[in-house]
Image (spheres, rainbow, N blue to C red):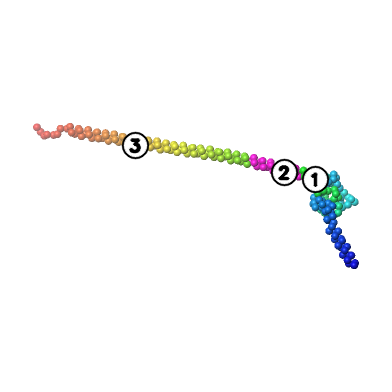
């Protein structure tokens, strides 16, 4: 019988130990499940231990964020923004983010996005500038290519004119040389003909009379 009573006491203690978190969860569901809590009073004392009899070591203000280290009934062991560790009454905090914190987070997000937008604007401007530079260089290359083609065509035409002129001049020289050669031949033939005519006019020798 005595053993049964001892076992029953042990079971009751274990039950209390197991039921305590459940009771805390039912009473303070948000705080019990949150690692971060926010002060919901204008000014709240942080004490050196879990109880009003402990000394005040710091004061936290409305909406300040606290990090929970451990819990003890209606008290929370927390770390405050300054880095100090102390205890705060559970009812002085809440788990949901206050509007001021949400606004600040949104403000940080907006500022960050603005910074990203500005960076994107700079990148776009740099890209446009590079594109304009490339277009300018491409235009210069195109002009250089067109000029090169034009110069090549001019040289080709000049070469063709030179060949045509050279052919004409060569033809003229050949014709002149041929004409001179003909005239020289005619002159020689005329000389030979004159000699033959002169020989024909000389009387033949008939002996003494």
Q: Is residue 98 visible?
A: yes
The residue that label 2 is drawn on is 112
> Which of disc 3 and disc 2 is earlier in sequence?
2
Q: In the picture provided, is 172 more to the left or to the right than 117? A: left
The residue that label 1 is drawn on is 98
> Which of disc 3 and disc 1 is earlier in sequence?
1
* Most frequent secondary structure within the magenta stretch: helix
Q: Is residue 130 magenta?
A: no
Location of residue 28 with respect to 144 vertically, above or below? below
The residue that label 3 is drawn on is 174
Tell me where residue 159 sits by quadrant: top left
- Residue 161, given in percent of the width and then of the height, sits at 42, 36
Q: In the picture provided, is 36 more to the left or to the right than 53? A: left
Q: Is residue 81 visible?
A: no
Dividing the image into 4 quarters, which one contains the C terminus?
Answer: top left
Tell me where residue 7 sits by quadrant: bottom right
> Which region of the structure is painted magenta?
105-126
CA gap between label 1 and label 3 equals 111 Å
- Residue 66, given in percent of the width and then of the height, sits at 81, 49
Q: Residues within 10 Å of mark 2 (few under 14, many from 20)?
A: few
- Residue 149, given in percent of the width and then of the height, sits at 49, 39
Closer to the camera in the image, 16 or 110:
16
Dividing the image into 4 quarters, which one contains the N terminus?
Answer: bottom right
Instruction: Report the residue at 84% width, 57% height from top.
Output: 19
Indicate the secondary structure of the residue bearing disc 2: helix
């Amino acid at each position: 019988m005595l053993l049964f009573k001892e076992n029953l006491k042990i079971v009751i203690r274990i039950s209390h130990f197991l039921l305590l978190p459940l009771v805390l969860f039912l009473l303070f569901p948000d705080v019990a499940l949150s690692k971060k809590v926010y002060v919901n009073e204008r000014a709240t004392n942080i004490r050196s231990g879990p109880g009003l009899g402990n000394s005040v070591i710091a004061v936290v203000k409305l909406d300040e964020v606290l990090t929970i280290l451990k819990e003890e009934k209606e008290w929370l062991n927390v770390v405050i923004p300054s880095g100090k560790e102390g205890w705060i009454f559970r009812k002085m905090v809440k788990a949901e983010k206050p509007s001021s914190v949400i606004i600040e987070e949104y403000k940080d997000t907006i500022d960050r996005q603005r910074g990203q937008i500005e960076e994107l604007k700079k990148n776009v401007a740099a890209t446009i500038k590079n594109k304009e530079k490339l277009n300018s260089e491409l235009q210069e290359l195109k002009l250089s290519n067109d000029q090169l083609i034009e110069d090549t065509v001019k040289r080709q035409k000049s070469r063709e004119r030179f060949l045509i002129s050279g052919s004409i001049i060569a033809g003229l020289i050949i014709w002149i040389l041929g004409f001179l050669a003909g005239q020289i031949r005619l002159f020689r033939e005329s000389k030979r003909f004159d000699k033959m005519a002169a020989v024909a006019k000389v009387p033949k020798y008939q002996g003494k009379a």
